[in-house]
Amino acid sequence: MTDKIKEYIAEAEAFTTANKEELEAFRIKFLGKKGILNDFFAEFKNVPNDQKKEFGQVINNLKKAAESKVAQIQEAIESKEEAKGVYGDLTRPGEPFAVGSRHPISIVKNQIVDIFSTIGFNVSEGPEIEDDWHNFTALNLPEYHPARDMQDTFFIQTNPDVLLRTHTSSVQVRYMEENKPPIRTISPGRVFRNEAISARSHCIFHQIEGLYIDKDVSFADLKQTLLYFTKEMFGKSKIRLRPSYFPFTEPSAEIDIYWGLKTETDYRITKGTGWLEIGGCGMVDPNVLTNCGIDPVKYNGFAFGMGVERIAMLLYGIGDIRMFYENDVRFLEQFKSSI
Ligand code: PHE
């Protein structure tokens, strides 16, 4: 009988499967209630006393062999299942990645940068936290100048010399301080004004300002540059420069483009005039050139500035400026195709 048991031990040790049902059949065959082991245990009482010890040992060996086999195969099967859980069915078709989209402000900013780069303008950037000199004083806005009130400024409470820039003209000052004419640069960036938030204005928005400094630059050069831009950007070929005032330009003008009066929306956004204001411009004031280390007798030039949000609102028909900052995915998703 011991030989028979040893054969079973060999069988149990050789057993292998990757299948749960086969493993269960094996377990029942050896360790089940009516299994081989129980049969042998039942035999135990019939074994002569002098053989009981050896018999007992061999059955125990069979029990251990069967039990450890079941445990070992079970573990192997489970770890395989775990791996399946991580990778899933490797033959399944892949799931598409959720592709993000560029923010409409970035799309429009990039478009403007591209348009000006084809006529030789480079891009310049500067700090959002500025000092008084670069944001105001160098731009012909000395302390107590009433025009400082035109731009409600966020100051850093403890130090009136530190503020959040109210326009990217500050970048132009920095650029003129560091570079010699001829200068052709545009300065895109975020600006800050202490204004009430509404559908039309926000305390944080984006500007693109342009600066052209060379010998014998004329107002006609300014107008042609702006006309070229509005044609490229909006497909509109009529602009008008309306006299205005900025401390850093003389003469100064507001830039209007003729939008037309075809649809109801055209009437609404142009207030029935057909004309839309998109920014300010002018010939750089000689004082500003002097402040920035450029000789105003030798050089002159023009500057212009416009709001990126306003242009994006016009291009995409967006009625509320606050939508740009809410990061609502339903809004942002609509710009996927515009990248
Ligand atoms: N810096 C002006 C503003 O933010 C815009 C401007 C730029 C006007 C350049 C004229 C020339 O309002």
Image (cartoon, helix red, strand yellow):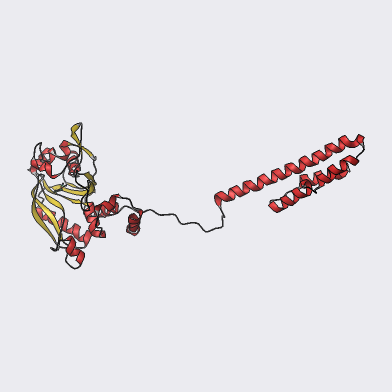
Q: Measured along the vertical axis of the image, is residue 53 above or below residue 335?
A: above
Which residue is nearer to you in this view: 44 or 137? 44
Q: Quadrant of residue 226?
A: bottom left
For the point 22% across and 58% down, the residue is 314
Q: Position of residue 96 (x, y in %)?
A: 46, 57
Task: Give the farthest residue toward the bottom.
Answer: 262
Q: How many marks?
A: 0
- Asked whether the viewer can see residue 245, the reply is yes
| Residue pictured at 15% horizontal, 36% vertical | 133
Q: Quadrant of residue 313?
A: bottom left
Could you say which quadrant of the image residue 170 lies in?
Answer: top left
- Position in image of residue 75 (x %, y %): 66, 44
Residue at image x 83%, y 36%? Answer: 57
Q: Nearer the viewer, residue 54 or 145?
A: 54
Q: Relative to residue 35, is residue 141 drawn left or right?
A: left
**Is residue 295 visible in the rendered structure shown here?**
no
Direction from residue 249 to residue 188 in the image, left or right: right
Residue placed at 16% from the left, 36% from the top? 132
Q: Is the N terminus in the top left, top right, bottom left or bottom right quadrant? A: top right
Find residue 73 and report its horizontal and vertical position in percent: 69, 46
**Residue 265 coordinates in the image, percent (x, y):** 21, 64
Q: Nearer the viewer, residue 299 or 283?
A: 283
Q: Is residue 27 left or right of residue 201?
A: right
Which quadrant of the figure contains the C terminus?
Answer: bottom left
